Amino acid sequence: MTLHDDEPHGASHNARLNSLRAGVLGANDGIVSVAALVLGVVGSGASASAILTAGLAATVSGAASMALGEYVSVSAQRDSERMMIAKETRELAELPEPEHEELVSMLSSYGMNTTTAETAAQEIAAKDRLLEAHLRLEMGIDGEDLTNPWHAAFWSAVSFLAGAALPLISVFFAPMEMAAAVVAIITLVALAVTGYVSARLANTDATHSMLRLVFGGALGLAITYGIGVAFGGVIG
């Protein structure tokens, strides 16, 4: 066992981390957007049924929007990656010498001397892994682990729904006279948790991440609640 056997490496690990970060961001979107809308409606003095209806509508439309946006984005990325894979495959077949020189150059850029890089390129070719090497070193693509747009859309919607459920559940069970305070507290605590999780995933400072999310969320909630209070009576 080597010193770093317990540390995961490779494109597939990075892809999983990116998926987890996307899930946390989706949950944040669900928490903030639905909580802000609910607080705005609460501030307007609307009835409990109107508040819940608005919250449910925001949850469903937000999840659908997140899923569609993620599907379109990841589909475009996947199409682009497939095009680059096809292009690199064609170049390896039609231009083997220039591609060999390019691989040697890329390996040399990592600190190998030319002789070592030449030997490494020949060994990669002997093991029929030229395409894999070019994709990873030249384009940062793992040809065996392309992102699935359907999976991305599904988990984006699920993470949004999970986040949105918190303000919805809190406003459903809270007494009307305390609804705004309960929703705000639950939302800010949830943002602190997601801030901590995202910081741990990114290996960054947790305190800074939590404070940034809580402050931003509190500002957004205050603005929408203030708009509800200011214009609710006028519109009503």
Image (tube, grey):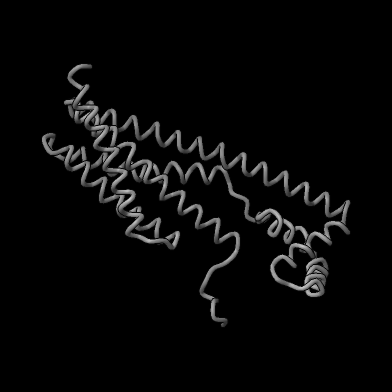
Q: Residue furthest top?
A: 235
Q: Residue furthest bottom?
A: 1
- In the image, what residue occupies the spot 27% across and 32% down? 224
Depth check: 206 or 60 in front?
206
Depth check: 182 or 220 in front?
220
Left or right, 229 with reference to 118? left
Vertical side of 50 occupied by 174: above or below: below
* Quarter occupied by residue 120: bottom right
- In the image, what residue occupies the spot 83% across and 54% down? 92
**x and y percentages locating residue 31 in the rendered image:** 32, 42
Quarter of the image where the C terminus is located: top left
**x and y percentages locating residue 49 in the rendered image:** 21, 27
Q: How many marks?
A: 0
* Quarter occupied by residue 205: bottom left
* Quarter occupied by residue 136: bottom right
**x and y percentages locating residue 118 in the rendered image:** 82, 70
**x and y percentages locating residue 25 in the rendered image:** 42, 47
Quarter of the image where the N terminus is located: bottom right
- In the image, what residue occupies the spot 20% across and 22% down? 232
Depth check: 114 or 124 in front?
114
- In the image, what residue occupies the spot 23% across and 34% down? 39
Vertical side of 143 occupied by 8: above or below: below
Left or right, 160 with reference to 90? left
Left or right, 144 with reference to 184? right
Vertical side of 193 occupied by 173: above or below: above
Left or right, 103 with reference to 7? right
